[in-house]
Image: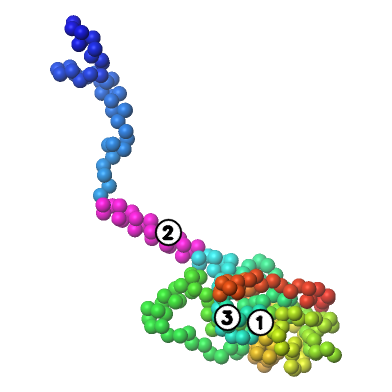
Amino acid sequence: MTSSDHRRGPDDDAPGVRPTDEQVAARAESVPAHAAAPAEPRGGRGLSLLRETVIIVVSALVLSWLIKTFLVQAFFIPSSSMEETLQIGDRVMVSRLVPDVLDVHRGDVVVFKDPGGWLPPYEAPDRGPVGNAVRDAATFVGLLPQDTGEHLIKRVVGMPGDTVECCDAEGRVSVNGVPIDETYIAPGSVPSQSEFSTVVPDDMLFVMGDNRQHSQDSRYNTGKPGGGFVPIDNVVGNAFVIVWPLADMTLLRNPSDVFAEVPEP
């Protein structure tokens, strides 16, 4: 046996020497798994990317729809009836937890569906078939704010059973016999130019705009369905934050101190 025979190991590929089965198995186990995987065709990678993109987009749209339906929804302010609290063009976020999960309270700013005849007939701007379809779809899933063609936004002043009247010797609104100092009324406005006294029926709300002389609210809709009151079932939610314009972004807090001394009916 030559010296070279002593240097040859059991794994050497000597010409004419056939490796044993154990050697073949050992070499197969030492090969990385990825080395044996076939390369994915370019078309397959493209389809995989497209599929993942579609899944992400659809998931985002479904999540947006769920949020809009059950948690929050955006609304656009089209009029001056809630100035100075809300300006024309403001976008507000509305909690959909009210009134199904959380209760409505005096002082809340609520969005509600027209009880009937409060608003004139509304026709959305025509942007053409494609534009209308895109707008409706984006609004449905919550990517665009809901127009207010059939919705109003006002402040709750009277709850079911409350007696709401105006005006006392100082011109203030009273709730259940207690005059309230409404700190949210627009500068230059008075609580009401007309006198009234009413008892809020069960499951109804008495609402007023903060810009009292420019708000067609419960005071002026007594001859309409519901007698000027808003069914609680018509409430979409309460506005809790202004999100646009960014410079005006702010939380809309309930002025609970205004109604702190008001007793229950």
Distance between the alpha carbons at the discs numbered 1 and 2? 41 Å
Left or right of 232, for residue 126? left
Q: Tag 1: Cα neighbours inside 10 Å, few (<14), some, or many (≥20)?
A: some
Distance between the alpha carbons at the discs numbered 2 and 3? 32 Å
Query: Residue under circle 2?
Result: 56
Q: Residue at x 43, y 62 (%)?
A: 58
Q: Amino acid at mark 1?
A: Glu
The mark closer to the camera, 1 or 3, is 1
Q: Kindly state the secondary structure of the residue where label 2 is placed.
A: helix
Query: Residue under circle 3?
Result: 77
Q: Earlier along the polypeptide chain: callout 2 or callout 3?
A: 2
> Which percent across, then down, holds residue 167?
80, 90
Is residue 218 visible in this depiction of the protein?
no
Q: Tag 2: Cα neighbours inside 10 Å, few (<14), some, or many (≥20)?
A: few
Residue range in magenta is 42-63
Q: Amino acid at mark 3?
A: Ile
Residue 64 is a magenta residue: no
Q: Report which quarter residue 51 is drawn in.
A: bottom left
Residue 50 is a magenta residue: yes
Query: Residue under circle 1?
Result: 84
Nearer to us in this view, 216 or 170? 170
Q: Tag 3: Cα neighbours inside 10 Å, few (<14), some, or many (≥20)?
A: many
